[in-house]
Image (cartoon, coloured by chain):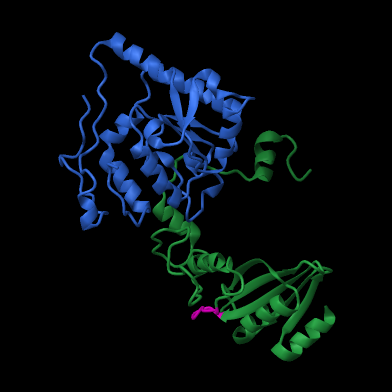
Amino acid sequence: MIKSLSTETTLENAGLSAEEQDLFSNARPQAYEPYPIKAVEDFANWCRANSLWLLAFGTGCGAIELRPLMTARFDANRIGVAGRPTPRQSSVFIIGGYSSVKTLKRIVRSYEQMQGPKFVISLGICPINGGMYWDSYNTIKRLDQYIPVDLYITGCMPRPEVLVGGLLELKKMIKEGRCDGANRYVENFDWYKANQKKVIKNWNMPDYNW
Amino acid sequence: MNSMLERLSREFRVTDIIERNARLTTFTVDRDVAETLIRELRDREGYTHLNFMTAIDYIERGVFTLVYMLHNYATKSTLGVHVNIDRDNAEMTSIHTLWAQAWTYQRELRELWGINFPGSPRIEEDFCLEGWEEIPPMRREFDTVEYCERTFVSRDGRETTDPREHMHEVIFPERGGDN
């Protein structure tokens, strides 16, 4: 059973103005609880793994690799991956390389809008340790400080082949029930939120609910 | 080209005329006449295209050098207009009335170097850095590494090796020396 570390039951939504406060819910995120019967959960995981919906959100130079991934040559449709234009309908978020603080704000926003089950693939070396942006004033070094990452694909830039390999690996992990990023986000929600607010100075959005 | 530069240096106190190559000439002009000069170049000399504008931080001399790069399609020549402005009171006439796209550059200059362009559209708004609280990051007194270490979390285990020493010590230890 997963419990939230904080004892508070509602979120503060301090970044919102008084009239906006009424427009957004202040409920805390809920952790996903697996089905009590293991066979049912396994079947659900098998279903999840075979219908991955990619969020069409290019967040860095790696986004250029998503075009050949989806088109005829590498053709991700054959492994059950298709694109969706909105976070509310997608389940896989590929962070395509470096992320500036301005982009991070949009990443957090998109990630929180995604419905569960949701998985994050981090592409390239920059979200891992900063890469060539290790001394940049505007580029975050570690993505896993801000949102949970299920799978890393390193390289600069990784080719679409390795992205296909990464997606196959992600499918394997989902089938085994090892992709618990969304639950980690709920468990350590206050830690993630504090990290996000440390770099995103103008926090003018709700804390979780969109 | 030369007659134009002669006339300009007579009328506008143009200094430091340097012919960088056959198609690029730069010169420096005083701040208060710069906008008039650029307007004249655009309207009468055919320099109708603003390639870009940017700033150079000469912290030793206490000035920012603004660079306006103008292009003439007829003669295929490029002109770099340099304007020195005071670093402590960085302010310059806006040229968004000459080229509408200039206000984007001016927003960037204000955000990254802290140079103000009064009257430029949306100059007060955040551009790339949202909620920036430090001094403008492209100013040379801004310590990028220090800020980066203070703000972002590093991952352990990142280390760099000097390629030359690494080759001597690890790859070719038997060779030694410089060979």
Rendered image quadrant of residue A88: top left
Provide the residue span drawn in magenta. B86-93
Q: Residue at x 76, y 80 (%)?
A: B17
Q: Nearer the viewer, residue B64 or A12?
A: A12
Q: Nearer the viewer, residue A52 or A101?
A: A52
Give the position of the N terminus of chain A as an image quadrant: top left
> In the image, residue B128 lies at what x, y percent?
48, 58
Q: Residue furthest top?
A: A39
Q: Residue at x 77, y 66 (%)?
A: B73
State whether residue B29 appears in this view: yes
Supply the letter of whichever chain is blue.
A
B99 shown above or below B28? above
Q: Residue at x 43, y 65 (%)?
A: B125
State whether residue B140 appears in this view: no
Q: Nearer the viewer, residue B165 or B109?
A: B109
| Chain B colour in the picture | green
Q: Is residue A26 magenta?
A: no
A167 shown above or below B13? above
Q: How many marks?
A: 0
> In the image, residue A64 lies at what x, y percent?
59, 38
A161 shown above or below A188? above
> In the image, residue B177 lies at what x, y percent?
74, 44
Q: Is residue B90 magenta?
A: yes
Rendered image quadrant of residue A25: top left
Give the position of the C terminus of chain A as an image quadrant: top left
Left-right relation of A49 to A12: right
> In the image, residue A181 lies at what x, y percent?
35, 30
Q: Residue at x 69, y 40 (%)?
A: B168
Q: Nearer the viewer, residue A11 or B57?
A: A11
